[in-house]
Image (cartoon, helix red, strand yellow):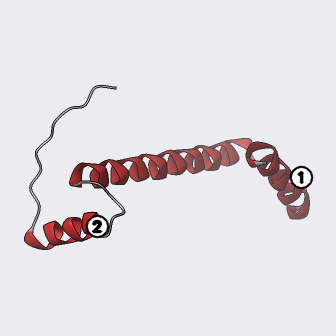
């Protein structure tokens, strides 16, 4: 994977925070810290999109004649299949 060099500007307070994160030993460099933040943001966005799609699917499916208990049981079963 090719790396692309970026330049960013931070406030003094943000710079102090970044340095503290690196100094804690959790990150080897500023770049590693930023890449971690980007990956976390990508994960959150993927989760948001999946939930949004599920809501839309529910809206489009219309009114159900099943009970809430039946719907919940099916949802839990699907979750188990997907997430083991």
Which of the 4 image quarters holds residue 5?
top left
Please determine whether, in this image, residue 61 is positioned above or below residue 12.
above
Residue 55 image point, x, y percent: 62, 50
Residue 66 image point, x, y percent: 90, 54
Which of the 4 image quarters holds residue 70?
bottom right
The residue tagged 2 is 21
State left or right for residue 58 relative to residue 9: right
State left or right for residue 53 relative to residue 7: right
Q: Residues within 10 Å of mark 1 (few under 14, many from 20)?
A: few
Query: Measuring 24% from the left and 71% from the top, which residue is drawn there?
Result: 20
The reply to whether the C-beta atoms of the residues labelled 2 and 1 are less than 8 Å apart is no
Q: Mark 1 falls on what kind of element?
A: loop
Is residue 64 at least partly visible in the picture? no
Query: Measuring 45% from the left and 48% from the top, which residue is drawn there?
Result: 45
> Which residue is nearer to you in this view: 28 or 9?
28
Is residue 57 at least partly visible in the picture? yes
Q: Residues within 10 Å of mark 2 (few under 14, many from 20)?
A: some
State left or right for residue 42 relative to residue 18: right
Query: Measuring 59% from the left and 43% from the top, which residue is drawn there?
Result: 53
Q: Mark 2 falls on what kind of element?
A: helix
> Which residue is nearer to you in this view: 62 or 8?
8
Q: State which quarter of the image contains the N terminus.
A: top left
Residue 80 image point, x, y percent: 81, 50
The residue tagged 1 is 65
Query: Measuring 54% from the left and 50% from the top, which residue is drawn there?
Result: 47
Earlier sequence position, callout 2 versus callout 1: 2
Alpha-carbon distance for marks 2 and 1? 53 Å
> Which residue is nearer to you in this view: 14 or 62?
14
Please determine whether, in this image, residue 82 is positioned above or below residue 40.
above
């Amino acid at each position: 994977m090719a790396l692309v060099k970026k330049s960013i500007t931070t406030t003094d307070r943000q710079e102090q925070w970044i340095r503290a994160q690196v100094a804690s030993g959790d990150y080897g460099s500023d770049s590693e810290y930023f890449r971690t933040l980007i990956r976390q943001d990508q994960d959150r966005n993927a989760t948001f999109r999946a939930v949004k799609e599920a809501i839309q699917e529910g809206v489009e499916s219309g009114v159900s004649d099943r009970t809430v208990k039946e719907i919940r049981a099916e949802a839990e079963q699907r979750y188990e299949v997907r997430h083991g």
